[in-house]
Every structure is written in structure tokens, then in C-alpha cells.
Image: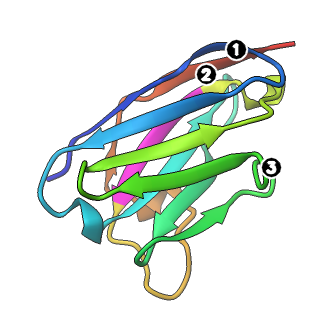
Amino acid sequence: QVQLVESGGGLVQAGGSLTLSCAASGRTFSRYAMGWFRQAPGKEREFVATSWNGGRTYYADSVKGRFTISRDNAKNTLYLQMNSLKPEDTAVYSCAAGVGNPYYPTQQPTDYNYWGQGTQVTVSS
């Protein structure tokens, strides 16, 4: 069982930056593939980024070059550094943990077993 708690969301102007954190319980954090997803009002949950297989990372095209996912296994914490934010980045951001796949990055919500409650990110124009 893994419990995930996100923090760091808020209101920011377009072009600004935010860093989200996801604190995980349990002693096996390093073994999990970790992902960030987001969901805007009226839209389906969308993959943002994943950290998997010993530190490899993969990003959705919409955030590539602007967002950076990282993890500190000693602190059981996942991060999402978000730069050059756009109004279309406005959403509830959630972190998730799953067993992952050693050969490819997992991008579907159904690939993840544990979810945080989410944190709101609002980007004003």
C-alpha cells in the first residue's frame, strides 16, 4: 500500500513557474514507476510525465521542454518542476504510483495503482 500526498499547487501568471511535490509513504518508493497526470474541467485525465525504470523520464509532447519530473528516493518524494506555464496548463495535478514496465514508459491511468488527492494549478493569462 502506498499513500501519496501532493502539494505546491497555486495560482500563477502565464510564463511563471511552480514546483509540485508528491510525498509517498512506504519503504518501496524507489521500486515504483511514478507519474504525474492532470485533469482540466470537462476533460479526461491526461498523462503529463513519468519517472520509471531507475530514473528514466518521459513527457507528454505538450509539456516537453517546459516541465521536469524528478524523484528523491531517500525522501520518498516525487517532483514536477513546471516552467513557462500557459493558461492551458490549468488543471488538477495528481501523482500516481504503479509497478511500471521495464521496457516502456507507462502513460495510461490504468497503469497506476495508487493516486494522490490532487493539487490545483491555475495559470492566469
Q: Indicate left or right for 85 with 109 as reference.
A: right
Label 1 is placed on what type of residue? Answer: Val
Mark before the other along the chain sequence, 1 or 2 = 1
Residue identifier under label 2: 121
Q: CA distance from mark 1 to mark 3?
A: 18 Å
Secondary structure state at the residue bearing disc 2 = strand
Quarter holding the C terminus is top right
Viewer-side label of 1, 2: 1
Q: Residue at x 67, y 22 (%)?
A: 41
Q: Are marks 1 and 2 in contact (CB under 8 Å)?
A: yes
Disc ID at residue 12:
1
Mark before the other along the chain sequence, 1 or 3 = 1
Q: Residue at x 14, y 53 (%)?
A: 1
Q: Indicate left or right for 13 with 44 as reference.
A: right
Q: Find out whether residue 52 is within the magenta segment.
A: no
Disc ID at residue 99:
none
The image position of residue 71, as x and y in percent, is: 41, 55
The magenta span reads 92-97
Residue identifier under label 3: 62
Residue sitting farthest toward the right: 125
